[in-house]
Image (tube, coloured by chain):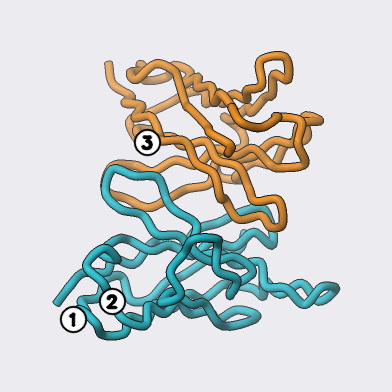
Chain colours: A cyan, B orange
Amino acid sequence: DIVMTQSPDSLAVSLGERATINCKSSQSVLYSSNNKNYLAWYQQKPGQPPKLLIYWASTRESGVPDRFSGSGSGTDFTLTISSLQAEDVAVYYCQQYYNTRTFGQGTKVEVK
Amino acid sequence: QVQLQESGPGLVKPSGTLSLTCAVSGGSISSTNWWTWVRQPPGKGLEWIGEIWHSGSTNYNPSLKSRVTISVDKSKNQFSLKLSSVTAADTAVYYCARDTDVSGAFAYWGQGTLVTVSS
């Protein structure tokens, strides 16, 4: 199994400031034949299903604001919210789809 | 727009079998996508349970594999989950989901259904 580990477990950021969430996989999720990282990011608000933000590690899903960006390759990835808005308060999950599927434990983002 | 809707009993007795169905609308269960079950215990994170292709090919979470069966019903455009020998640890919100057309990420989700295991 590929284990996904996120850090930190929670963070508090002032409105308008940058939020950075890290995700590390126990083995590479980069598929050499197509040079794609099989890594996605989701946002989940209370009482709602997760919402896909990013796939292929850095491709923004349609309709997702451009303040959300993904980066990284191999085993180390980052989700950045460039300017935190009140509506971004949520739990964020990374997920690998290189070998079946596994999620990280989640990172709770709050307003400081 | 693809829509997914979970249905099934909200209460299951310990040692019993949890059975849920996901109805698909706005798209065909025979499309080239994986149809997936994910669960989330109250206050905890997401756990992938397993997935099925329209042909019937399946992949399961190794930690649940011995108790899980996912099946597809093309005539009803739906897929189902059975989880046997349940305990209180299986209490969770169960979601069905579908991947995107270009990746294995889940773009479409049902609203989720809470299943409680209790006598």
Q: Are marks 2 and 3 in contact (CB under 8 Å)?
A: no
To the question of a shared chain for discs 2 and 3, the answer is no
- Residue at screen point 56% across, 26% down: B81
* On screen, residue B21 above or below A41: above
Q: CA distance from mark 2 to mark 3?
A: 28 Å
Q: Amino acid at mark 1?
A: Ser
Within-10-Å neighbours for mark 2: few <14, some 14–19, many 20+: many
What residue does disc 1 label? A14
- Check the picture and name the quadrant holding the N terminus of chain B: top right
The disc at residue A84 is 2
Q: Are marks 1 and 2 in contact (CB under 8 Å)?
A: yes
Q: Amino acid at mark 3?
A: Val
Q: Which of the two discs, 3 and 1, sits closer to the camera?
A: 1
> For residue B7, what is the image quadrant?
top left
> For residue A90, what is the image quadrant?
bottom left
* On screen, residue B40 above or below A71: above
Q: Identify the mark nearer the N-term, 1 or 2.
A: 1
Return the chain for callout 2: A
To the question of a shared chain for discs 3 and 1, the answer is no
What residue does disc 3 label? B93
Q: Secondary structure at mark 1?
A: loop
Q: Amino acid at mark 2?
A: Leu
**Which residue is at the far right?**
A33
